[in-house]
Image: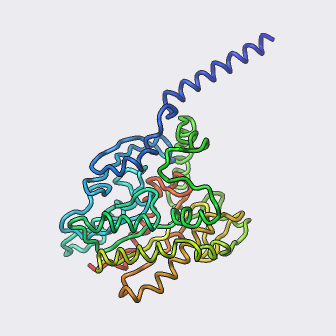
Amino acid sequence: MKKIKLIGVNFALLGFAVLFLELVFGNWLQQNPAKRIPEISRQAGRTHSFRTYGLTGEDVLVNFTRNEQGFRGQGNAANSRQILVVGGSTAIEYVVPESLTWAEQLQQGLNKTLSQSSRYEFDVINAGVAGQTLLGNQFSIDLWLKHIKNLNPEFVIVYYGHNDAIYSLGKDNNAIISDPDSKSIGVREWVLTSSALVMLLREIKGNLDSWALNNNNLFDYVEGGLPVDGEIFTRGQSHARIANSSYSDKLNNLIWSIHRAWPIAKIIFVAQSNPNCYFLDHYSYHSYSKNRICEDLLAVHSYTKSTILSMNSDLSGKLFYEPLFMDNPYDRSGSSDAIHTNSRGSKGIADKLTTRLRKYLVF
């Protein structure tokens, strides 16, 4: 009986100790700063600093800043060759340090390719806004970006995919979808973003994966290797539903909004990937079981590609499509969740895009 009481007392003390440490080092008493960034980011000219504490698979200090024009970082430098980036949270990357975002690393990579005789360097201007679908990107162009003085991009990169797969197609299946910037979160997300122990374990796992992989496999599906024991799934209801969704109008309206704002600019749609999907082509993916987000993402990319090919002649060869999703550009050490990257994944995206975009450049 005494042993049972002793064990009970020890467990109680251990529980109190864990509770104390969680309250001190966790985020139970306040919402994790990283989750508040979508709201804060809309307040141009302010800086918000926070540590990720393993939330993204790594522990880094982030100084999130939008300048007076609303761009992340400096942006819109005088006498520069401008590349404008629009998209959602995967474009703005609010949990990645500014110097390590794929947009910033893309700028660095492209400028290394400049010849010594070139007068101007590239300036990659990051105008992403968390939660944006193609409709949100169109609003950004029409109500914000085209009115900014001295913004005259040579290229406009539309980094798209997940938000439209979720919000444009997901609603057609009566899916329960919350506002991307909503403060209400589920129990699982609450634990993931509040528990000090969980965040520590995620940081250790992310750093361990990075060490083991040496960041050489950022474009391979590495969790358990390729899903060779799974099945190949081809396009199904997602492709049929896209014709009945609002996606077609969103895509066309965004393209023409960009073209009207900057008629000379080349428009490049970059198709996002997903670490849970091993895409074989624009019509099929390999997985252990059917995955709704894989099917919807595949439908969005397949439809976008065919639309761009059909519209290119109308825009004098200024409309392009880059299927980055075919490279599956994440491994688990380079992703903070099923959609977003950390700084390691951002480097993989930037390296790939640097190579891809060179063919469009005129030096």
Q: Which residue is drawn at the image coordinates 69% and 15% (left, top)?
A: 9
Determine the image quadrant of residue 152.
Answer: bottom left
Determine the image quadrant of residue 298.
Answer: bottom right
Q: Residue furthest right?
A: 1
Q: Tell me where residue 182 appears, x and y as whole percent.
A: 49, 48
Q: Which residue is drawn at the image coordinates 60% and 68% (left, top)?
A: 296
Q: Tell me where residue 176 appears, x and y as whole percent.
A: 61, 55
- Residue in the foreground of this view, choosing between 76 and 102: 76
Q: Which residue is drawn at the image coordinates 47% and 64% (left, top)?
A: 133
Q: Which residue is drawn at the image coordinates 29% and 46% (left, top)?
A: 46
- Residue in the foreground of this view, choosing between 27 and 341: 27
Q: Is residue 343 visible?
A: yes
In the image, residue 269 above or below residue 189: below
Instruction: State which quarter of the image contains the N terminus.
Output: top right
- Residue in the foreground of this view, choosing between 338 and 204: 338
In the displayed structure image, the side of residue 315 where residue 297 appears, left or right: right
Determine the image quadrant of residue 171.
Answer: bottom right
Q: Tell me where residue 42 appears, x and y as whole percent.
A: 35, 52
Instruction: State which quarter of the image contains the C terminus.
Output: bottom left
Q: Is residue 356 visible?
A: no
In the displayed structure image, the side of residue 69 where residue 231 appears, left or right: right
In the displayed structure image, the side of residue 336 where residue 172 appears, left or right: right
